[in-house]
Amino acid sequence: MMGIQLLLKRPFRFLLKKIKCYLGIEVESEIMIKSLRKNGAHIGNNVSIINSELDYGHAFLIDIGDNVTITGARVLAHDASLKKVLGYSKVGRVIISDNVFIGNGAIVLPNVTIGKNVIVGAGAVISKDVPENSVVAGNPAKVIQSYDCFINKHKVEIEKGNTTWNTYWLDKTEKEKEEMRNSLIDCTGYDI
């Protein structure tokens, strides 16, 4: 009987995996947002928090605007480096304004404001305020270009369509994956 159940499940594994992956990302983000709000965070609309750690204990010190994506990052509203020596932790507000993307591995430290229309590069350490309309990267994070310049540069490349794919990553055929691999040997491309 167990063998029959396994055989019946096999055809559905791929579909189930796709559904879990898609829903998992959405559900994880919603659960985190609800939990942070419950702990006092102010979070706007159209916010995605994926595989990230935000300071639950000090969530009431975190404000997140509209149209924000935080992916694989850490956002801290406290710093316990003084706790053993002085008996206190430093705390500070974290304000993430509208239209911000925070990349994988980035760390946002306490007492920081990230302005509107900002892209925080992967691995960046945000220890000071980030001006609006900027792209920052590095440790410590520094402005590397304006937001508009970054967006326009990539918009032009996407419009050329040379290395652009319009198939969601879970739906790509083996042929599309191979084409993509071969096309991206010496350049970057764009995927939905």
Image (tube, rainbow, N blue to C red):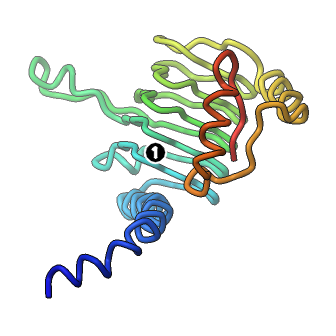
> Vertically, is 83 above or below 161?
above
Which residue is at the front of the view, 118 or 111? Answer: 118
- Residue placed farthest to the bottom in the image? 1
Which residue is at the front of the view, 84 or 52? Answer: 52
- Label 1 SS: strand
The residue lying at 49 percent from left, 22 percent from top is 126
The residue lying at 41 percent from left, 36 percent from top is 75
Instruction: Residue 138 in the image: state x and y as whole percent.
Output: 52, 13
> Vertically, is 22 above or below 146?
below
Instruction: Residue 31 in the image: state x and y as whole percent.
Output: 40, 64
The residue lying at 61 percent from left, 52 percent from top is 173
* In-image side of 33 versus 120 (left or right): left
Say which quarter of the image contains residue 45: bottom right
> Vertically, is 109 above or below 142?
below
Which residue is at the front of the view, 48 or 114? Answer: 48
Q: Which residue is mark 1?
A: 62
The residue lying at 33 percent from left, 32 percent from top is 91
Which residue is at the front of the view, 77 or 90? Answer: 77
Q: How many marks?
A: 1
Kind of residue indicated by mark 1 = Ile
- Residue placed farthest to the left in the image? 84
Instruction: Residue 58 in the image: state x and y as whole percent.
Output: 33, 45
Say which quarter of the image contains residue 144: top right
Say which quarter of the image contains residue 130: top right
